[in-house]
Image: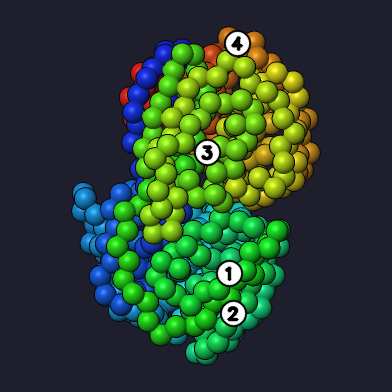
Amino acid sequence: MNNTVKISQVIQPYNKNLKIEGDKSLSIRWALLASQALGKSKSFNLLKSEDVMSTLKCLKQLGVKVNFNKNFCEIISKGLNGFKYKKKIILDAGNSGTLGRLLMGLLIHAKNKIKIKGDQSLSKRDFLRVTKPLEKFGAIFKTNSGKLPIIINGTKNPKPIYFYENRGSAQCKSSIMLAALNTRGITKIKAKKSRDHTELLFKHLNLPIKIIKKKKFDLIHVKGVKKIKTLNYKIPSDISSSAFFIILTALSKNSQIQIRNVNINPTRTGVLKILKMMGVKVKIKNKKIYKGEEIADLFVKSTTKLKAIKCPTKLNSEAIDEFLLIFLVAAKAKGISYFNKLSELNQKESPRLFWGSKILNKMGIKNIVTKDSIKIYGNPNLKIEKKIVIRNFLKDHRIFMSSVVAALTFGGHWEIFDKTSVDTSFPSFLNKIRELGAEIR
């Protein structure tokens, strides 16, 4: 099967309503928490991506009953520590760092050794950020120099801990919070600001959590419990997936788009704040609160005059998954844009900061990259006519999708490999792009 797409024509003007699949972070967190609830939990609009399917497969191996049909997903669990599984079990997290790291937090009470592995990309990522704090609970980890595969040997009596999470990693913070539910006592976390989906779900479930918000960090106290109630959830649309269409529209001519019921959690809207600073026209309408999360409709129009910026580093964690797209906006902005303290980008599925620079170089956009920063010299009049080939990026879904957006807005003759990479997070991406009228071969 041909695993490439070829794009040789910019997208024509459009005015469309688009429905985006469920939020990946919430889909995985719902499944993991439902696996600890006593009874039947049901979700609607669950993202049907490889990362979420990997989550459900791992839960099945751990003895959790999962029913999946066209309209909803149902999880039937025996409650906290209700996992039942065979000895020498091997769980495959695939490409999902969220699954791999959060699942470890649920397994600190594991009675038998469990091995967790991942694909080529995930096996290159750092897991010490979760194994070190989880060891404080009493679990034992045998790692491959801090990377997957990892063997977990749980403890009978997990003890509450204190941990300072200074990376701004929501995955690390969430893993500790899930582990804390298994203890007799209160776990205290001092956490650098990051996504708070897990905290909001804990609050909605009335789990014993206390949060004290400071300027640069949060103090989070989680008390161990004996029971978690079931969770029925209609998962809102993913803002990270929506961002591809927001920026496609902003960079296209005479186009507009409406995306309904998008999760605009304040810890995820850095991309909207940055785009506003750069002059992109995004309107947020019909705001509401659903199970603690902010939901709204987004309206976007083409933008002809884009401004270069020095991006505030305080927005980095809120937009960490969207910077490849933001770099494309900077490429078309008038002036020099500067982005700093982005080393975390290189801890993703691929070294994204360096790949962002590489794609800009291929496009003919001057940029200067270091290990944690990039300076982009925008060219509002750029029109690409040459051939550009994108390949060998460890099947990073965001590199593939960002390259498609670049091809459809800047022109040129693009050949982009590994189209199956989108299956990890956004399987319908190319179909959505074609809905807007794009010509993709």
- Residue placed under numbered mark 2 in the picture: 187
Q: Secondary structure at mark 3?
A: helix
Q: Kindly identify the residue that appears in the image at 60 percent across and 31 percent down.
A: 276
Local secondary structure at mark 1: strand
Vertical order, 361 against 293 (above or below): above
In this image, 85 relative to 391: left or right?
A: left
Q: Which mark is first along the chain, 4 or 2?
A: 2
Q: Quadrant of the N terminus?
A: top left
Q: Amino acid at mark 4?
A: Lys
Residue under pointer 3: 398
Q: Quadrant of residue 137?
A: bottom right
Q: Image quarter for residue 218?
A: bottom right
State whether residue 299 appears in this view. Answer: yes
Answer whether labels 2 and 1 touch (C-beta < 8 Å): no
Say which residue label 4 marks: 383
**Mark 4 near mark 1, Cβ–Cβ under 8 Å?**
no
Residue 401 visible somewhere in the drawing:
no
Gap in angstroms between the C-alphas marked 2 and 4: 55 Å
Q: Categorize mark 2 by other alpha carbons within 10 Å: few (<14), some (14-19), many (20+).
A: many
Question: Closer to the N terminus: mark 4 or mark 3?
Answer: 4
